[in-house]
Image (cartoon, rainbow, N blue to C red):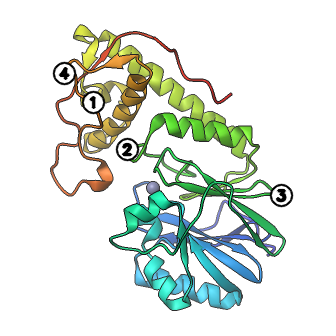
């Protein structure tokens, strides 16, 4: 319990974020630059495992060996959300330990073909684990059923894919929703956040500053997109057309992914009445990256048009 996070540790090295909150990074097939997903073990004598993420046998074995060496009683598996780089080891671990899997109902719905979720977790649900009291928070934005888990006393937050210790967070519609995401980040600041354990990368000691930076970054992106759109002929463009200007540093192979991010911003601006679509279409066009299997048109030939600032930026979260 004495080893605290050290920046020089290797990517697989376990560390304690707080007494009773241990992080076990597992190698997963996640998006670069990340190579691992943080599995979190909360509690002392009785523990809950959050996101046993790895589909790789040797990593699953490592987690099991680790849990056995701790000698704690595992009560349950909790999931932050349904993405494969968070749920890859769920079936193996639940079978090995005979424990229930809990998640938000929207996550259970998306997993139903692969993983049975035994019980639902909702916003505000609290669980006592020895000296720790853990509160589930419904935190949509990256995924509709996304949950974060907050230790009530230290305010340490197991944040899943709300923020990243390395790389960025993908907001890929319709599962990802930019307005929800910003509202979630704002809520976490309002409710006072301590250190943040992201799903990928090292502990973030100053959670509040990180969240404020994320909100600032998204606001800047939104302004950039609005300005870029207004400079185009007829003030209209497809998401992919805006990518080279908005993301000049991103290599072309990632442009379809970047276009989904631009789309997320455009859909938020559309909800606010600041852009519309000349073709009169609605809904979310194209195929989300996580659902894409090959050469689908992820960002089809749909244009968005600037029609002015009818509501202004949404700053309700302050
Ligand atoms: Zn994710």
| The one of 120 and 77 positioned closer to us in this rendering | 120
Which quadrant of the rendered structure holds the C terminus? top right
Which residue has dot 2 on it? 172
The mark nearer the N terminus, 1 or 2, is 2
Which quadrant of the rendered structure holds the N terminus? bottom right
Secondary structure state at the residue bearing disc 4: loop
Identify which residue is drawn at 61% across, 78% down. 76
**Dividing the image into four equal quarters, which quarter contains ligand 1?**
bottom left
Q: Is mark 4 within 8 Å of ligand 1?
A: no
Task: State which mark lies toward you, 3 or 4.
Answer: 4
Residue 279 is tagged as 4
User: Within the image, what quadrant is residue 315 found in?
Assistant: top right
The mark nearer the N terminus, 3 or 4, is 3
Q: Position of residue 127 (x, y in %)?
A: 72, 68
Task: State which mark lies toward you, 3 or 1.
Answer: 1
Can residue 29 be seen here? The reply is no
The mark nearer the N terminus, 3 or 2, is 3
Q: Is mark 3 within 8 Å of ligand 1?
A: no
Q: Position of residue 170 (x, y in %)?
A: 43, 45
Give the CA distance from mark 2 to mark 4: 22 Å
Give the CA distance from mark 1 to mark 2: 16 Å
Label 1: how many Cα within 10 Å (few below 14, some 14–19, many 20+) = few
Q: Is 225 positioned to the left or the right of 199 in the image?
A: left
Q: Is 277 positioned to the left or the right of 122 in the image?
A: left
Please say if 318 is above or below 63: above
Q: Position of residue 91 (x, y in %)?
A: 44, 81
Q: Is 241 positioned to the left or the right of 263 in the image?
A: left
Which residue has dot 3 on it? 153
Residue 282 is tagged as 1
Give the CA distance from mark 3 to mark 4: 52 Å
Q: Is 184 positioned to the left or the right of 81 in the image?
A: right
The mark nearer the N terminus, 2 or 4, is 2
């Amino acid at each position: 319990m004495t080893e605290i996070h050290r920046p020089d540790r290797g990517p697989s090295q376990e560390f304690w974020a707080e007494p009773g909150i241990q992080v076990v990074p597992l190698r997963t097939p996640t998006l670069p630059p990340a190579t691992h997903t943080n599995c979190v073990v909360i509690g002392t004598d009785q523990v809950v495992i959050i996101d046993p993420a790895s589909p790789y046998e040797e990593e699953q074995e490592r987690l099991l060996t680790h849990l056995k060496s701790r000698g704690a009683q595992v009560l349950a598996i909790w999931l932050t959300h349904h993405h494969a780089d968070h749920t890859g080891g769920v079936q193996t671990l639940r079978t090995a330990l005979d424990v229930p899997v809990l998640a938000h109902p929207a996550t259970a719905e998306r997993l139903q073909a692969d993983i049975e979720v035994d019980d639902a977790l909702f916003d505000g649900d609290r669980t006592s684990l020895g000296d720790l009291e853990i509160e589930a928070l419904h935190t949509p934005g990256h995924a509709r059923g996304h949950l974060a888990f907050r230790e009530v006393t230290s305010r340490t937050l197991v944040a899943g894919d709300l923020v990243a210790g390395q790389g960025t967070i993908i907001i890929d519609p319709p599962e990802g929703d930019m307005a929800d995401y910003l509202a979630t980040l704002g809520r976490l600041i309002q409710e006072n956040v301590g250190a943040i354990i992201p799903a990928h990368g090292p502990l973030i000691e100053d959670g509040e500053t990180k969240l404020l930076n994320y909100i600032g970054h998204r606001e800047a992106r939104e302004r950039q997109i609005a300005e870029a759109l207004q400079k185009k002929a007829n003030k209209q463009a497809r998401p992919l057309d805006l990518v080279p200007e908005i993301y000049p540093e991103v290599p072309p192979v990632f442009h379809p992914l970047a276009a989904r991010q631009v789309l997320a911003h455009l859909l938020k601006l559309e909800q606010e009445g600041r852009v519309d679509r000349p073709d009169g279409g609605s809904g979310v066009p194209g195929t989300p990256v996580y659902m894409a299997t090959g050469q689908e048109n992820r960002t089809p030939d749909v244009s968005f048009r600037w029609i002015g600032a009818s509501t202004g930026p949404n700053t309700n979260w302050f």
